[in-house]
Structure formats: C-alpha cells, structure tokens
Amino acid sequence: MCDQTFLAITFGPCDSCSENRPLMNLYIKTEPINYCSLCMEIMACQGLASGETLKSLKAESETLRKKLEEERKKLHDVELEKVAEKAEALGELNMKTRRTLKGHGNKVLCMDWCKDKRRIVSSSQDGKVIVWDAFTTNKEHAVTMPTTWVMACAYAPSGCAIACGGLDNKCSVYPLSLDKDENLAAKKKSVAMHTNYLSGCTFTNSDMQILTSSGDGTSALWDVESGQLLQSFHGHSADVLTLDLAPSETGNTFVSGGSDKKANVWDLRSGQNVQSFDTHDSDINCVKYYPSGDAFASASDDSTCRLFDLRADREVSIYSKDSIMFGAASVDFSLSGRLLFAGYNDYTINVWDVLKGTRVAILFGHENRVSSLRVSPDGTAFCSGSWDNTLRIWA
Amino acid sequence: MARDMSDIDILKMELEQLKKEVSTPREPVSKTSKDTMDWCEAASGTDLLITGVPDDKNPYKPEKGGWKNIMLYLHRNTWQTYCSYVSLFTGLKRLKLERKNRRDIH
C-alpha cells in the first residue's frame, strides 16, 4: 500500500500551446518541462528535437541578437551629426498654410499626390474618397466606399486610377474618368484580399501592380488586372501599419513597419526579408525612404522619428525632444532629403534637419491629430491630412 | 497570419531571420553618412522647400481669399478685361472700315 505512487495531476498553461490543460511533467536534462498530452503527441509526430522548447529557442535568438548588435557596433565609428557639422546651416523656413481643403465629413486618414503635382486623393473615416485639385481647391471626384475607416489610398502613376481600402480587408481600384457625372463606384475593381484591415497600399512603378500591407501581419504584391497574388511577405509578428517602395533608381525593395516595433526591408521578387531594424520602443506608424534610396525614416508612437541607414545596417539618427510627448503618425522627406516633416498626435508638424538632427520649425494650424503627410512630387509644397476633417497645403 | 501563429512559430520565424541577417554585408557609418551628406548637398539646389520659389512662379503663393490678393486679382483682371475690350473694339472698327472700302471700290 505504501509504495503506491499517485500521479498528481497538475493543471496549468502548457509550455508549447499555452492553453490550460492537465500537464505531463517531463524532465529533459534536468530541466522541468510541462507539456499537455496533446502537445506530447504532436511533438512525437513532428519529430521535434527533444531539446527544442520555447526557452531554448528564446536563448538561441538572444545570442544571435547579441552577435548582430556586436557586428553592427563595429561599424559605428562616427555619428551622423559629427559628419554633418561641415554642412551649411539651413536658413529660416517660412512655411504657412496656403490652402485648406474642406469637404470631408470625418477624420482624414490618408492622402496621396498625383504625379502631375496638382491632384490629391484623400480618404476618411466616413468612407468617402475625394480627389482634389490642389491649386484651386476644387473637388474633382468623390467616391463613397461601402466601408468606413478607409485607412489607405493611393494615386496611380498614370493619374488614371486610385486605389483605396480599409476595414473591408480589401483594396479596390477605381479608374478615374473625365466625365464628372459618371458613377465611379460602378467601375470598381477589388484587387487585394487580406484577412484583416488594409493599413497601406501603393502602386509600384506601373498601374498594373499594387503593394498592400494589412493588419493580418503580411504584405502582398497583387496584379491589378487579374487580382492575382504575385508575392506575399511574411515576417512581422503583429499588424503591419505602413509601407514604402524604394525610389525607382535603386531597385526592387520596400520597407514596412508594424506594431511589433520592427521595420523590415523586403526584396519584391524573392519575398525575402533582407534587413530588419527593431530599435523603436513602440508601434511604427509610418516609414519613408530617403530620396537616394540608401536610408529610410520611421515615425513611431514612442514620439521619436529615427533614420536608419541601409548600407550600414543600423539606426544613425534619432529626432526627438523631451517636450514632444505624443506619437508621430507620419513622416516625409523634402526632395533633397535635407528636411524631414513629421506630423504628430499633438496637432503639430515638426520640421527636422535630417543631417544635423535638430528641429528647424514647428508648424501649427491643425485642430486635431495630423494623420498623414506627403511632399508633392516636384517639392514645391507638402500636404497634411488631419483628424479635424481638413487637409492643409503648406508652402 | 501573424495573429494565428503560436509563440513557438513566431520565435522560429524570428530565429531564421536573425540567422540570415548576421551574415549581411555592412559598411562603416563614416562612409555611408558621408555619401548621404554628399547626395543631399548635390540635390539641395533642386529642393524648392529650402531655396524657396519666387512668388510669381509658385502656384500656391497667391493665397486664395487673402484680402490683399483679392484686390490684386481684381485689379489685374479689370485691366485685362479693359485691354481685351479695347483690342476687340479696334479690331471691329478696322473690319468695318475694310468692308466700307471694299464696297466703295466695287
């Protein structure tokens, strides 16, 4: 009687499937491991190495991360600010709101310029997508999407179509016609299908392909005519919030930023994640390539914007101030890359000197968060869209 | 996709990625920063937001609805309308004279 041992059933979270189940206590190399019986079966079938557990994987990734840090540190021989001391100081910037585009009924979430440097497409929370003429502030086209929160919109390079999407999980392309009375919604084409909200979309160099990013953690490249998926990009461990395509001279890559605080650089053709940067402390809301294509900037909820150099594979500059406590929602570079415009959740736009790392100006005017910001293709002005239902053009 | 993955799968994915990244070629920051700065200086001549654009060339500078600019717009417009009326009038007068001359000849 005394030598009868009873197996005490422990109940708790399993190490591998994290569900509350009755656990079987194992000892592998004196390390106590708790797996539920289901996982034991699965492990046996999959032929997982007996040593592979969450802990060992974590340990391995830690050592690799440290090694990566060391490699990167070796090349960090000088700060960008030091090199930039030789650069000329910028003169006084005299920028004001030149046009206010009013007409949206709710928060403006996204905007894009047309290559003709004159037209702007903007989308808002109430489902309306409007095409404006920036010089005259006239509305040229208006489309009502069947969904609210249209978080992404883009103008085609030819200027003949717009793409937009949001909570409907897909990206729709509307061809624009010269006839104002024509019902644009009738010609709509659904291109992308994701399993969660669409956070960003952009046309590649032609009207035929669209790159989208989604809350389901993936980005994808689609063919517009057939709606087929050409390539998908997996690598983020949380929602992908933003993406930007490299400027055409430098090749087929794009950068995406997500809620997992990482910014990843991808190769369009192979679908591979080429580089990854994770120095931000919070969600990355916007990423933009430097005009030369060798660097990119990111704006994050941790109230900083950072510049990452792709060839040196590290962060080279942080644009932050103690007085800025609100997250940055959007960034863009001026044509030469000397100025970085960033829109913040404290209703302001800060203009940073990219090389010296200092703030050059603060622009006030919006009455709510600045949600998106883009410089015009010829660099004469930039437009900012805000949660106060308006867009402002600054020059 | 990322939301459906279990923690182990996410970790495995990250591990694969790190293994790839450790071996990417890198250049020292001194070289890349200098290249960035040189590119920037070379392009700064074309950056209109820094150099500024003269008011008559900038499509945004005449602020719509600015009181000074409304007066300027009206002033410019009235002069233009006047000139065009004058030229129209003189043109018509010349036409009349020509027709009269032709009739007289015939």
Image (tube, coloured by chain):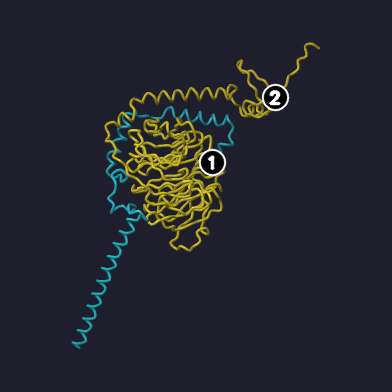
Chain colours: A yellow, B cyan
Q: Which amino acid type is shown beneath numbered disc 2?
A: Phe
What residue type is disc 1 on? Gly
Locate residue A249, reporting x and y percent. Answer: 35, 43
| Residue extending furthest toward the right | A1
Q: Is residue A179 left or right of residue B84?
A: right
Q: Residue at x 37, y 50 (%)?
A: A98
Q: Residue at 43% across / 62% down in the picture?
A: A178
**Residue extending furthest toward the top:** A2
Label 2 or label 1, whichever comes before in sequence order: 2
Above or below A280: residue A146? below
Q: Are the residues flagged by discs 2 and 1 in contact, CB closer than 8 Å?
A: no
Quadrant of the rendered structure where residue A119 is? bottom left
Identify the residue position indicated by label 1 in the image: A215
Residue in the picture at 47% in, 28% down: B18
Quick check: can you spot residue B16?
yes
Quarter of the view holding residue A135: bottom left
Above-or-below relation of A138 to A346: below
Give the percent coordinates (x, y) of residue A139.
44, 57
Pick the residue in front: A43 or A365.
Answer: A365
Q: Residue B67 location in percent, x, y?
A: 35, 56
Q: Which residue is mark 2?
A: A11
Q: Position of residue A317 (x, y in %)?
A: 38, 31
Circle 1 residues within 10 Å: few <14, some 14–19, many ≥20:
many
Chain assignment, label 2: A
* Position above or below: A283 against B67: above
Determine whether the residue tagged by mark 1 lies in a helix, strand or loop: loop
Spatial distance from mark 2 to mark 1, Cα to Cα? 34 Å
Q: Is residue A225 visible?
A: no
Q: Chain of mark 1?
A: A
